[in-house]
Amino acid sequence: MSSSVLSIHNLPAAEGNSIGAALAEVAIAFKHLSAALLRQALAPVAKSQPQTAFEEAEALRSYAAEIQQQDPGFAQDLFAAADRHEIEASALAGKSQPVDDYNYTELRRVIANPVSATV
């Protein structure tokens, strides 16, 4: 019969309270994180100048031109919405916008696909 003896005096001692040290590090990290989030939330926001109806319409037209290849129908809807927005804003401002029977949607289609257009 054989027996084994393990001497526990040779094992290295634990470095303090490892759970307590870990919790202290977590608390410090949480403090830094919450301070950074609070600074970000309370930081002054730069106020942008409000856009005019023309600038808003032009931004919408630029977006419509970007997506025209992927979804031409939606792009045409966006072009029309930009036109309506600009005309409505100028009417509300008291400026008379000449509205004629010219079909802007057809003009954009011709510009986008000049080969398929028939005049």
Image (cartoon, helix red, strand yellow):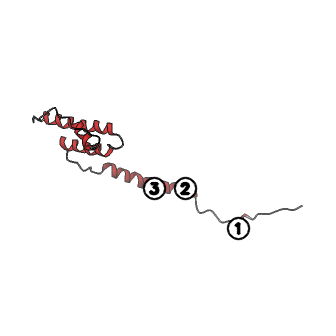
Residue shown at the point (40%, 51%) measured from the top left:
34
Label 2 sits on a secondary structure element that is helix
Whole-angstrom CA distance, mark 3 to mark 1, is 35 Å
Which residue is under mark 3? 29
Mark 1–mark 2 Cα distance, whole angstroms, equals: 25 Å
For residue 116, the mark is none
Percent of width and height locating residue 51: 20, 44
- Residue, x 70% and y 67% (percent of image)? 10
Decide which of 43, 7 is in the foreground and name it.
43
Nearer to the camera, 5 or 107: 107
Q: Which residue is mark 1?
A: 10
Q: Is residue 13 above or below residue 100?
A: below
The first of marks 3 and 1 along the sequence is: 1
The reply to whether residue 52 is visible in this rendering is no
Q: Position of residue 3 (x, y in %)?
A: 84, 62
Residue sticking out furthest to the top: 101
Q: Quadrant of the N terminus?
A: bottom right
Label located before the other in sequence (1 or 2):
1
User: What is the three-letter code of the residue carrying label 2?
Assistant: Gly
Q: Amino acid at mark 3?
A: Ala
